[in-house]
Amino acid sequence: MPRVIEDTVGAFVPGPRLELDGAADGPLNGLDFAAKDLFDIAGSVTGFGSPDWARTHPPAAGTAPAVAALLAAGARLRGKTKTVELAYGLTGENIWHGTPTNPAAPDRFPGGSSCGSAAAVAAGLVDLALGSDTGGSVRIPASYCGLFGIRPSWGAVSLAGACALAASFDTAGWFAARASLLRRVGEVLLPPGGEAPLGPVLKVQEAWVNATPATAAALTPALEALEGLLGPAMQVKLVPETLEQAFENFRVAQAEEAWATLGSWVEATSPKFGPGVAERFAAAKAVQPAQATTARAYRDAFRLRIRAVLAGGAVLAYPTSPIPAPKLDVNAESQQAIRERTMGVTAIAGLAGLCEVTIPAARAEGAPVGLSLVAAPGRDRALLALAERLAEALHLPA
């Protein structure tokens, strides 16, 4: 009999728990996993964080391939996890289903939009959990909750049978409390190849300056340990046009796609949204064609430049988030400022389609902060192996 899971942190969606046995054997046999409630499970309604979405959509006809692959590898599904409404947010707040508790810092947000998946792993309810990452929705909750997390190269893991937000940015990522398990899940979900060694390390100056002094200081020993593995870091100025411009172009390009993907449903349904979500969709609707054209051109040029820098195997290193998780009582204005400051950094991998692994390397101001390792598209397996080596060097759960 599988163990009974008591959801002490509000990670799972309300209602009866959806559970499925995995295959009798396989590389993940004996492990429990959860899936963000935007992945389809045959016969079940995918809620996408919104009661109105659930009300207006039928049960799924099939199971998302990413979920099916974990089941086939022997892992047992223990439930669907909460997400921000339509996956359009970074704090993890959901006024309809309840905001999950951050097990690593209960007075702070868990991070979103894969908030429930992060909370479930951080609380030890499951061994691993699927999430999605468009603008930072695996990387940020992993950093906030003290977990290992990966945003794979864009397109590396199937998002068939998953609700879309902005298709050319969306990725299927996952969380684990141990680096070795993060890698083992990658062996199941990632395509073969890309194992060649990585290096040198590039310290991204703008991202370190963007971080609070406490965050940067807390993560410096982890950077030094990475240098012990790959040699002295080279300091680079990667985004000379500023992180603020990177964020704004990412925001516009993502918003154009979000409205193209979900705007018809929003207009037809007039759903009720919680704080911030309605405003983001209103801003997405208001994007002008000339703005979107400029943002897409910026993205194309950014992608070419960054991929050229990483083509030989270089690894970017910088704080995953500039600050620890914000406190639950932070006001809306401060939340927006944190969002913009954070997404200036998460936009680097998002705009260029890169793979990024975040490591729970330190604590600052009493809460976890993550160090990100970023590599060229297709180097996911090598990046996961490097993350495991760094975890061992830092005496983290490996």
Image: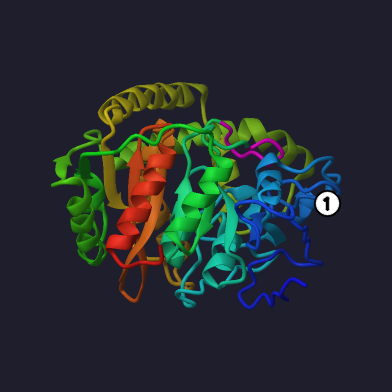
Q: Nearer the viewer, residue 315 or 112?
A: 315
Looking at the rendering, the stretch of residues picked out in magenta corresponds to 159-167
Is the residue 147 above or below the residue 284 in the image?
below
Residue 247 appears at what percent x and percent y? 38, 40
Screen quadrant of the C terminus: bottom left
Residue 163 appears at what percent x and percent y? 68, 41
Magenta stretch, main secondary structure class = loop
Residue 249 appears at what percent x and percent y? 40, 33
Label 1, residues with CA under 10 Å away: few <14, some 14-19, many ≥20: some
Residue at 61% x, 71% y is 125
Q: Nearer the viewer, residue 308 or 336?
A: 308
The magenta stretch spans residue 267: no
Q: Nearer the viewer, residue 305 or 199?
A: 199
Figure label count: 1
Residue labelled with disc 1: 44
The magenta stretch spans residue 165: yes
Q: Is residue 133 visible?
A: no
Residue at 43% x, 72% y is 327
